[in-house]
Image: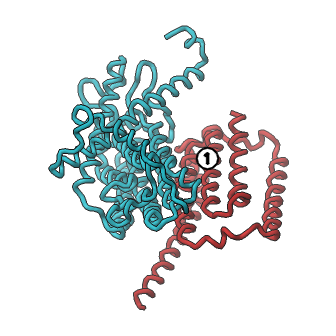
Chain colours: A cyan, B red
Amino acid sequence: MTNWFYNLTPNEQFAIFSLLKIVIAVFAVVLPMVAYSVVAERRISAWIQDRIGPNRVGPFGLLQPAADGLKFILKEDFTPAYARKAYFWLAPAVAMVPALLTLAVIPFGSKLGSQQAVIADLNVGILFTLGIVSLSVYGIVLAGYASNSKYPFLGSIRSSAQMISYEIAMGMSVIPVFMLVGDLNLSAVIEYQKNGMWLILKQPIAFVIFLVAAFAETNRLPFDMPEAESELVGGYHTEYSSMKFALFFLGEYAAMIAVSAMMVVLFLGGWTLPFAGLNETATSLGMGLLQVGIFIGKLLLFMGLFIWVRWMLPRFRYDQLMDIGWKRFVPLALANIVVTAIYLYLTHGK
Amino acid sequence: MEILFYIFSALTLLCGLLVVFNPFSRNPVTSAMFLVLTIICMSGLFVLLKAFFLAAVQILVYAGAVIVLFLFVIMLMNIKEEERQRFRKFGTFLGAAAVAGLAWILVTTVMNSRTGERSVANNTGETKELGELLFTNYVLPFEIVSLLLLVAMVGCILLSKTSETEEEAE
């Protein structure tokens, strides 16, 4: 580091480091990950269905994202005549942004050098993520409204009801986690897990509810009612083409990465592994990078699960989906809160 | 920090105005979207007051759920008529009068309380302090509000249930 850097005020240094973390985390890590999860999805689906999948572009088809991206840009960007133009343009951006914003509070490692490996260490981290995730419904709703046609409209109506229902289950499922941890900060959640059991073992019900709600929130099968190719053509993105469609498509994967990261932090101990000193705050840069690697490894596990489930399970019927959300998961989450409260009262109460 | 306060309050006011008084569009969906922006700006103001919990909950509950339900209803209704409607003089006058009255009350209240008299504690934004206050000093209002919400919820369920049985009877 050069001298000018040390002459800056702490605030300016903080701003520079934050900017660096944002640029590196989003553009160098998350966006390529989004691109390659599309390839992974296609390869795994091919493998499940006993096909070969895309293997022509580059070694093992690894340059497929470049080919896909080029194709998306070169396709005609068509706007239907009766679409509401302003919303039609706004919707794809609104679909993409919340997923990337969520990543701001995820602690993806312990320390890199002297810097904490998290972009914004908010003390209400989880509420922030839930709030931002709840905004992601607007992309879909606006897309359906802007398209001004039947199928997208149905898709967006479904999605607004579905996402609100599962947000409630999702929000309630994490409450027991924070009752145990005693803090809403995500770094504190990892701190709690690094010397004890991972929360997936202490709160398996919370984990299951959160996992299922995550599928619903990201509109993945078996909850992809807003899209539902077989009944709604393409759902909310029927009228979209070219890069605008690509933004919806990539937004879905970015949202999957975001909820996977949340699950890793909340239930799988974040960047820790319970051996070889990997559950301690890193002292060297190499160790720090290794812990970031562990975090990404766990995250990829969840991405694999998302993809695997999509090609294994059929879609729910809409009333079944609402039944599971409201009549099963919400009461179950409430019961979980009460049981955890009783447990805490008996062990830590006066 | 001061400049941020002015930016957020200006944006809040502007977006709030555009919710009810948008000269470019009479579309209810546009109004709802400006309401979302208003709420996001307001949560920015909460952050500046170090009330992080309120800021997050503001976005989570209002922007994330309540207005989505607004949109849901707006989109299910036939809104063509509202779009054709122009501004009515009487409505505008009433609205302006109501705003002026509220503004007058607000200004007199602000003027009457001397600075530093009722300063807020620094850590009210912390989730823990907020929870403790809710369950000690303010437990009665809190429970009353909860009860009110419960009643409203039961009422909603009752209303939707009767319409369902009527359909079945037909």
Q: Nearer the viewer, residue A241 or A180?
A: A241
Q: Residues within 10 Å of mark 1 (few under 14, many from 20)?
A: many
Q: Please, which chain is the residue tagged with disc 1 on?
A: B
Query: Measured from the top left, where is residue A30 in percent x and y?
Result: 39, 35
Q: Nearer the viewer, residue A225 or B83?
A: B83
Residue at far left of view: A50
Label 1's element?
helix
Compared across the picture, whether A229 is left or right of B92 comes to left
Which residue was labeled with disc 1? B43
Residue at (49%, 25%) from the top-left corner?
A20
Query: Measured from the top left, where is residue B112 in percent x and y?
Result: 84, 48
Please indicate, yes or no, whether residue A131 appears anywhere in the rendered image.
no
Whether B102 is drawn above or below B124: the answer is below
Residue at far bottom of view: B170
Residue at (39%, 52%) from the top-left corner?
A218
Tag count = 1
